[in-house]
Structures are given as C-alpha cells and as structure tokens.
Image (spheres, rainbow, N blue to C red):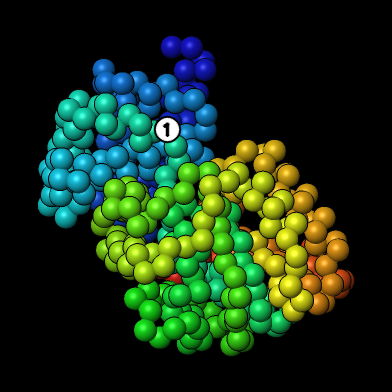
C-alpha cells in the first residue's frame, strides 16, 4: 500500500471512530454501532463499499458516516427492510452480528444506498433554535427587541419556523404556549436575559431545500435523525405538523447570493437585520464563507443605532469539536464587529451552558 493509502486509511478510521463516539456521547449508542460497521462495508465488493473506501475529501468534515446511516434508517422508515429495528431498539448489540447485517443490507440495497453518499446530511434540528433564541434575548439588550431573521443553509426550514416555537430557557419563557414544538433544554449556568423578542420577518435559503409538506421529502429528513434519539424524532414530527399548517419561507439559492440579496433590501427602521446559521458553515467552500463575511461586514460598517445588523452562529469549533454560540453586531458603536461567545451547547439542543458574557 502506498504512503497516501496508509494516511487515508488512518483518516477514515479516525473519522468513523470519532463519529461513533460522538453518537454514543449524545444518546445514540445504537446508531454508533452501525457507524462502527462501516469499515466492514468498505472492504466489500459493493459500489457503496468502494465509494467509502476511496472517499475523496475530508471524511469527518463531509460527515460521510452520517450520510451512510441516513440511508440505512430510510430503509426502515419506508418498510423496505426492517431488520435494523432490532438494532435501533438495542435488542442486537453484538458488533460482529451488526457488521454482518449491515454488509448484507448493502449487498441487497447497493443501488439505493449509494446516492446517500452524494451530499451532506440534512440534520435540521429544532433543538438548536434554543441557542439562537438565547442569542436574540441577549441582543435585545444591545439593539432593541425587533429582528428580521435570515437563515443560511436552512435545509427543510425547521429553524426558519423558530418564531412559532415555545421556549423555556432556564426559566425564561418565550413564544406561543400552545405550540406543538416545546423547546426546554437542560440549562446550565444563569438564564439568558429576560428581554422581549419580536421576530418581524423570517426566511431562509438552501441549495437543496426539503419540502416538509411532501411526505417523501419529510421522510428523507427523518432518516437523518438518529432513531434512538427519541426526543429528536418527536421534534421532527412537530416541525412537520407546523409546516403542514404554514410552510417556512424558503428559497433555493446559494448562500452568498442569498446574503447579497437580503442585504440589498430596504432596511426597516428599528429592526435588527440578522443573519443566522447552525452547524452548516463547515460544509460551505472557503470562497463562499469569505464572500458572505465580506458582504456582511461591509453592510455592518454602514449600520446605525436605528438600522443595526447582527450575526448569530451556532457552529462547531474545528479544534475542539465544541458547539459554540457566537454573536457579532453592528450599530455604530465601539463594539461593532466584536465576537461574543455566549454559550456552549449540545449539538442537538439537549443542553445549553450559558457563559454570562
């Protein structure tokens, strides 16, 4: 084997091990066992196995293991093959047995599973909106209570409906009490500021948005949710219910073009024009990230106290893999453009640790 081959094998193994540990630590041990079966699949003669074994790019950044497990879950959700139900229920835990079962499934459904490797997982998670809302509560104290929200990488728009959710953030409550989406993470530290928040408009973009009103599309989104994470499955059902009542405002558009477009719109007086995103920045090319940053900072440089800007990001620190809520704002003050780390958070919203900035 060449030196490049040795390095890639090590990278693949490390990515699979990290993703499996990540699943275990976040309440999905059954999904972790399926992830640990991937090396066996990579040694097989299927097209899916060859694609995995010869993966081009950074395996962990691409979330390749989660692409694969999404395809496996879809087989169960559609009823095409339900043998994994016993794995998801924790009734089969022996890794060798699971390895054989997964390899059998890949051999049988090779053609169907292969396309799941083509794109990143659509892990739209309503629990993450708890951090975004906490960021808005904090920003109200700096900029006022009215916000226009623009979401990048909105996927199915689950968080583009966040104004319809009910939140209990360490005892601070926000949103309609009767919402089917009740967001109440374990709150660590002091609660966020108990300020009013008014979302006057909210919209989002995605390169391949999922229509939650389409049963097949909604099922695909559910496939990316870890089935042993019961609370997450309940939240995606609540999001589907809300989308059936009124779909989120989504456009199919490149994120940089979307930013350029909403920045060109008339900026209402007394409203903070806000860009937000969660666990998606890493999937964008560096040139797109740079274009968005430059455009938003240029707009922020023209901000005033009557027409402020804010940027809320819940993303993964690439060095520590810790999920961090960072906020920047512009209003013509000395703090313009400064980055504030407000909290650490569970990747799917199970807990939030407020840092009292």
The quadrant in which residue 350 appears is bottom left
The quadrant in which residue 288 appears is top right
**Left or right: where 299 falls relative to 157:** right
Q: Position of residue 23 (x, y in %)?
A: 36, 52
**Left or right: where 247 falls relative to 310:** left
- Mark 1 = which residue? 118
Q: Position of residue 138 (x, y in %)?
A: 65, 78
Which residue occupies 26% across, 57% down?
228
Which residue is more in the foreground, 327 or 80? 80
Q: Position of residue 259 (x, y in %)?
A: 68, 53
Q: Residue furthest top?
A: 1
Which residue occupies 15% across, 40% down?
80
Badge 1 element: loop
> Which class describes the residues within 10 Å of circle 1: few (<14), some (14-19), or many (20+)?
few
Which residue occupies 49% across, 25% down?
56
Picture layout, residue 266 above or below residue 197: above
Give the quadrant of the N terminus: top left
The quadrant in which residue 268 appears is bottom right
Which residue is more in the foreground, 208 or 350? 208
Q: Position of residue 14 (x, y in %)?
A: 44, 36
Which residue is more in the foreground, 204 or 101? 204
Which residue occupies 27% across, 31% down?
112
């Amino acid at each position: 084997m060449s030196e490049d081959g040795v390095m890639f094998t090590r990278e693949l193994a490390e990515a699979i091990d990290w993703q499996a540990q990540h699943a275990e630590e976040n309440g999905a041990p059954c999904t972790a066992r399926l992830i640990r079966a991937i090396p066996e699949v990579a040694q097989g003669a299927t097209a899916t196995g060859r694609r995995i074994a010869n993966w081009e790019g950074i395996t962990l950044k691409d979330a390749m293991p989660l692409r694969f497990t999404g395809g496996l879950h879809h087989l169960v959700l559609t009823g095409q093959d339900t043998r994994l139900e016993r794995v998801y229920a924790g009734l089969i835990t022996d890794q060798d047995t699971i390895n054989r079962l997964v390899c059998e499934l890949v051999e049988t459904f090779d053609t169907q599973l292969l396309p799941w490797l083509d794109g990143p997982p659509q892990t739209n998670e309503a629990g993450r909106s708890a951090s975004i809302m906490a960021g808005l509560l904090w920003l109200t104290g700096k900029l006022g209570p009215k916000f226009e929200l623009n979401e990048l990488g909105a996927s199915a728009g689950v968080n583009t409906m966040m104004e319809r959710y009910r939140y209990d953030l360490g005892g601070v409550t926000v949103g309609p009490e009767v919402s089917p989406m009740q967001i109440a993470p374990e709150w660590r530290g002091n609660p966020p500021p108990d300020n009013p928040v008014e979302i006057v408009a909210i919209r989002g973009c995605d390169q391949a948005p999922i229509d939650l009103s389409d049963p097949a599309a909604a099922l695909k989104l559910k496939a990316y949710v870890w089935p042993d994470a019961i609370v997450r499955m309940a939240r995606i059902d609540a999001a589907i219910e809300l989308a059936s009542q009124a779909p989120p405002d989504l456009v199919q558009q490149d994120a940089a073009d979307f930013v350029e477009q909403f920045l060109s719109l008339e900026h209402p007086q007394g409203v903070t024009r806000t860009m937000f995103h969660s666990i998606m920045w890493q999937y964008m090319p560096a040139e797109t990230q740079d274009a968005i940053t430059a455009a938003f900072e240029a707009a922020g440089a023209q901000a005033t106290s009557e027409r402020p800007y804010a940027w809320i990001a819940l993303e993964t620190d690439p060095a520590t893999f810790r999920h961090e809520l960072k906020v920047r704002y512009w209003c013509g003050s000395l703090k313009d453009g400064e980055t504030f780390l407000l909290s650490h958070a569970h990747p799917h919203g199970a807990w939030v640790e407020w840092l009292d900035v």
